[in-house]
Image: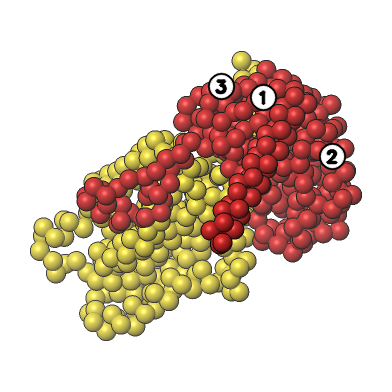
Chain colours: A red, B yellow
Amino acid sequence: MVVKVKDVSVKYKIGDFRDIGLKEYIVKKFSRNYDAKEFWAVKNVSFKLEKGDFLGIVGTNGAGKSTLLKVISGVLYPESGSVRTKGQVTSLLELGTGFDGELTIKENIYFRGALLGYTEEFMDKKYSEIIDFSELEEFQGLKLRQLSSGMKSRLAFSIASLLDPDILILDEVLAVGDAAFRSKSEKKMLEIIKGGTTTLFVSHSLMQIKRLSNKVLWLDRGKQMAFGETREVCAMYEKFIKEKKAAREQSLKAMEQAKKETGK
Amino acid sequence: MIKALDSLGSKFQQRKFLFKQLVYRDFKSRYKRAVLGVLWSMLSPLLYFSAQALVFTFIFSRAEHYISYLITGNIVYYYFSDATTQGMFSLTSNAGIISKIRVPKEIFLFSKNISSFVNFLLTLIIMFSIVALDQMPFHIKFLMLIFPIVCISVLNVGIGYILSALFVFFKDIQYLYSIVCRLLIYFSAIFYYIDAFPDWIRKMFWLNPLYCYIYYFRQIIIYNNIPGLWVHFLCILYPLLFVIVGKIIYKVNDNKFAYYL
């Protein structure tokens, strides 16, 4: 077992001291006006992944996908439940992570390698491979902020995928870059799967999920709707989406109908 | 056993590499962005000093070596306020990283403190030049300055722990702390002598850690005198207290930081 997620729940607070500052917090505490709202971003999620598994995570916006990935990468501590991972975890949550606009491309590659927990020796060995794959050799000396966002995402993907992690966590990163680079990165992903890396990724493209993953986790408003083989779960999810769409259209129609009638 | 040691070794290598990278980045952003770079960061304490020198030298004209008295106070104060203020931002300015990648969080604080420390070493050059201009003899006891420098550096880290943690939760700490820093200028005997105060007020000054270090600097530089044992004791006590409290705050809140960044 490489990843074991057991009964994980994550709670967010809104409207507590983050938004009001110390002075107001003290005033509110004294006047007993202080209350913070809570909601569960992820509730009782459990699944297991073996070596070489490729998990696609699907769900509508606000389903808790990114939150779950943050828990697995060790950034967020769950309110309850546990996550166990085995080996080097490399996460690529959103593109800008750990990049510094003032540093050059080369410096950024080293900086990011350091953040992800690799040694200098290792980065020396891997550097040329990374820069080759990203096709950014001629820009090495430029500052990162001088690159286009497409180039930045190419760089981010190249770093994460070429570092040979045991567990790779990707959040929506395969959807960027131009068409040529996208197909190249998908090829790389397939190579990674064969190499035994366990991958977790979030994507809004069901096509991509069907192509790449062997397991799918479906979340909806923090709850685990299904986990299992890609085909089964994707079918359930598609059906759910269709029904939701139909229901929405119906309610829209009903509203229009109601408008017309009141209009008369 | 060997394997465990090996993994400990590689862990150390990783941390060392990360630390190096962070220090490098902090330096670059500190010195590259400003047009005057290194010069500018030395200029700012120098300006404070010059303004005070301009205004107060006349008032304290009878005091001996007032210029040396003033510059030592200013340099120590500036190091303290710079390092702690920078330290306060260490978590939030790296929020993008901390909320996405699992990293030991203290390392950002240490890195900021290193860059403030190097900046302090540069301002020491200014201090010694002015002391030389004031025709103070340099002597072997100056080496003892290493002691308060080490102590205040640890104190800066300790206060940085507390401020950076608080700043994650309360954004107005920033303004409150800048007021504290400004008040410290008046309560640390930077530009005046405390002889005129009654005895009990003079004793109160020892409650201010910053005053202990400024006192130490002046005793060595101006009076060629190594302070007594109990001053050493205070110089060690304050950093220890703050580091312990700060460490505890970090430990307790470690799980919460990522939610608020």
Q: As displayed, is residue A87 above or below residue A209?
A: above
Which chain does tag 3 point to?
Answer: A
Mark sitting earlier along the chain (1/2) = 2
Residue A73 in the image: state x and y as whole percent: 61, 34
- Nearer the observer, B213 or A195: A195
Q: CA distance from mark 3 to mark 1?
A: 13 Å
Q: Residue at x 51, y 68 (%)?
A: B41
User: The disc labelled 1 sits on which kind of residue?
Assistant: Phe
Q: Residue furthest front?
A: A264
Q: Is residue A220 left or right of residue A143?
A: left
> Secondary structure under badge 3?
strand
Image quarter hosting the N terminus of chain B = top right
Q: Is residue B22 left or right of residue B74?
A: right
- Nearer the observer, B161 or B154: B161
User: The disc labelled 3 sits on which kind of residue?
Assistant: Lys
Q: As displayed, is residue B214 above or below residue A192?
A: below
Which mark is on residue A227?
1
- Nearer the observer, A53 or B50: A53
Residue A208 in the image: state x and y as whole percent: 80, 38
Q: CA distance from mark 1 to mark 2?
A: 23 Å
Q: Which residue is mark 2?
A: A186
Mark sitting earlier along the chain (3/1) = 3
In the rendered image, residues at marks 1 and 2 fall on the same chain: yes
In the rendered image, residues at marks 3 and 1 fall on the same chain: yes
> Secondary structure under badge 2?
helix
- Nearer the observer, B204 or A258: A258
Q: Which residue is mark 3?
A: A6
Residue B203 in the image: state x and y as whole percent: 16, 56
